[in-house]
Structures are given as structure tokens and as C-alpha cells.
Amino acid sequence: MTEDRANPLKPAKPKHIILNSHQTRDSANLVPIQWGAANPQQRGPIIGSLRSLKYRNVIGTHAGSYGVYRALAVASGVLDPTHKADLTDTSPVVQLGPHPSWSDPDKIVSLDPFGTLAGQSFGEYDTDKYDILPTIAITKAHINIPELRDEIAQGRLHVDGKLLKPDGSLVVTKAAIDPVWYLPGLAKRLNIDEWELRRVLFQQTGNMFPELVTRPDLHVFLPPIGGTTVYIIGDPAAITNPDLPLAVRVHDECNGSDVFGSDICTCRPYLVHGIEVCVQTAQEGGAGIIVYCRKEGRALGEVTKFLVYNARKRQEGGDRADAYFLRTECVAGVQDMRFQELMSDVLHWLGVTRIDRLVSMSNMKYDAITNSGIQVVERIAIPPELVPADAQVEIEAKKAAGYYSENGGLMGEELGQVKGRDY
Ligand SMILES: [Zn+2]
């Protein structure tokens, strides 16, 4: 309005804003979502695309946090908001599932088990009106990790030419998964009242999604958070075969170590050890799974993480194992916001019922997995020789806090003696 007043010759351009993200006030005209139904047609499609404004049956928008980049692309004029995805040849390269867990509304609450399916799988819906987009994509890749070449040279891994190639590259099947939250199930899993969950989600996202509190009839939320990637090593069919061994590492993103080799923590060495165990298990005829969750810095974010690093290094007495968690709590108010209770969903999506080798020392992950009904046979700690010198603080602090280790952890004064580098 100000602009028009400043330039009276310019014709007024109506730019009204509709505060509701859904055109209808109730869900009577929307395709119902029957979470936990045995087949996709009964369950109903997840319609989060803004191209289907009239038919959207969820809160939030497609593609998690990338919806914000889509907004930039539309705002800057490089993306037509009505663009219809051409999904020719994009379907999964291997079929995973369906598994019995897919139709158990309590087993999976944070992803769409039928997420690989798009418009054409829901034949009765006109794809011009109902923009049904996949929230899961499955492809294949050759991955090349330098440490694997070292392990081949040392004789710890052997080249079989099929799974592990002479140049050290590893053949994998991988799946990218966007979050899809079924709010009643999520509330139940976390033991929170659903209304309370909706109210706090609304408030703590700066009132981004009013429908959380105005549309209790919409039960599915596409949260603007990072997703999960699954790497399957070996035959995916072996995952659900009870006669074959399965190795699993669930890894939460740590970009500084995973990609850049920062030595303050054990993340990359433990991840690589997990891949090694997965390769060995696959070469025995079984399979290995690496689940990679975008939960940087225990889901506190990388800025918080770096602030904590500074606080740890600068505190009186230097970086010490006995003050490791305290420094995080001072900055973030909590030690951890990963909510591992939701992590088991991806394992149930893959049909996992037993893990022969769980490559993790985390008691939180172990408890989440076993409480969800998956049996864990053996837990594999990081070999001590793989722990970087500056990461002794982290590993000893975690062991003292309940992480799994074969010979227990240090306590009291001894714990305070474990010190890290001064920058
Ligand atoms: Zn790390």
C-alpha cells in the first residue's frame, strides 16, 4: 500500500495473503490418511505439495527443510511454483518391503513406509490435481572411502570383486528418507499429550504452522528438519532373513569429523569401523546397514556444538572428561535432543527384527532399539586404537555416563585426569 501511495500512477496490485494453508475448513473433502493401514490405497496418499493446494491433507510442505530453499527459488523467479515433477525412471532400483511393521501404527510414526510411491501408484487420483510426491528414494552407488583401501592393504578386509572392488570401492544400495510425522503416534511414543505436542511445536517454530493448533483433523506433519540416509551393504533381502547375520550402525551426523576429519570426537573412525563390520557381515552372506541421521551436534546444531568446544577448551582446568556433558548443558540447557525413541522407525521400515552386530556404544540407541522390539545379539565398541588422542575426553565421558564398554569406564578422579588438547 505504501508503494502505491508513493507512486499514484502505478496501478494497485492486489497481493492478498491467505493465512490458512488449506482451502477447506475441515477434512471432509480431503483424502483421509489411515495411518498403519496395510496397503497404500487403504492408507491413502500423503499430499504435501503446494501444487495441490486444494487437496493437501497434511500440515507443512513437501521436502522437509528444503521447502525453504524452494521458497527462495520461487521468490527469485527461477522456479515455477506450479512445476509438475517428471518422475519418469525415478522409481526404486530395489523393492524394500512391505514388512509387517508397515501396518503397525505404533512401530513407525516418523516416516511414511509407503514413501517411495508417487502419483502413478495411486491410480484413482488425477495426477494433475493430486500432486503425490515420494518422500523416499532408493538408488545404488559405488562409495570410495580411503580407510577401506588401508584396511584392504592391512588384510582386515578382502576384495571379493562383487561387493568390494579392487580399487577399494564398495557397492551399496542407498535410500534417502524425508521425515513424515504421524502426530498421534509421535505423541504416544514420546509420552506427551498430542495437544500439548501440537501447541509447543507451533510456538517453538515461531508460529510457522498454525494448522498444528487450528486443524486437529489433520494428523500428519511434514516437519522442516533434516532427513535420514540408509546405506545397505550386501543383499537387501538378507536383512529380513533370520538365518543370515545383520550388522547395523546408526550414526548421527557430525560433519566436522565425518567429512573433515576433526579429531575431537570418534565419529568418523567409528563410522568407518561400522562400514568395515557391515562389509565383513555382508561377505559372510548377511547384510550391513548404516543409518545416517541429520542430527548435527546431538540435534543441538553445529553452532551450539562449536560454542561448547570453546567452553570446554577454555574452562578452568582445560577440556576434561568429567566436565564434558556439563559444558553442553550450560550452553544448550540439555545434553541431547536427538530423541532416539524415533530412530528405530527406520529399522522397522527396513524389516529389521534382530541385529547380530550393533556397532554402537550408545545406551540411548541400544535402549531405543531393544524397547522397540528389535533383538540385539552383540554390541561392538570402537577399537581403542581408532580413538583419536583428543577424543579420549569424549569417549571416557560417554562411558562414565552409561555407554557400553567391555571393561567399564573411569570414574571420579581418574575421569578428571582425562584431558584434551588446548586448541
Ligand atoms: Zn563427532
Image (cartoon, helix red, strand yellow):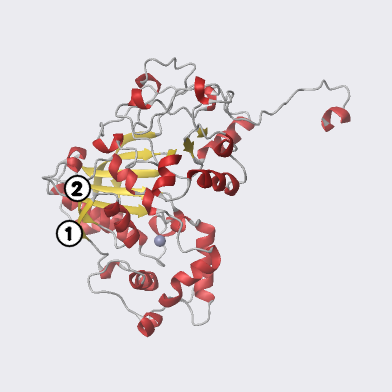
In which quadrant is the N terminus drawn? top right
**Residue at x 19%, y 47% (from the top left corner):** 166
Which of the four quarters of the rendered structure image does ligand 1 lie in? bottom left
**Residue at x 66%, y 28% (from the top left corner):** 18
Q: Amino acid at mark 2?
A: Pro
* Left or right of residue 13: residue 401: left
**Closer-to-camera residue (38/144):** 38
Q: Is residue 56 above or below residue 337?
A: above
Eye-nearest disc, 2 or 1: 1
Q: Which mark is residue 166?
A: 2
Is residue 130 visible from the viewing direction of this image? Answer: yes
**Residue at x 41%, y 78% (from the top left corner):** 419
Q: Position of residue 117 (x, y in %)?
A: 36, 27
Q: Position of residue 253 (x, y in %)?
A: 41, 53
Q: Position of residue 292 (x, y in %)?
A: 36, 49
Q: Which mark is residue 375?
A: none
Which corner quadrant of the image does residue 96 belong to? Answer: top left
Is the shortest distance between ligand 1 and the CB of mark 2 under 8 Å? no
Q: Position of residue 212 (x, y in %)?
A: 55, 38
Q: How many marks?
A: 2
Q: Is residue 208 above or below residue 49?
A: below
Q: Which residue is mark 1?
A: 156
**Closer-to-camera residue (69/199):** 199
- The secondary element bearing badge 1 is classed as loop
Q: Residues within 10 Å of mark 1 (few under 14, many from 20)?
A: few
Q: Amino acid at mark 1?
A: Arg
Is residue 61 visible from the viewing direction of this image? Answer: no
- The secondary element bearing badge 2 is classed as loop
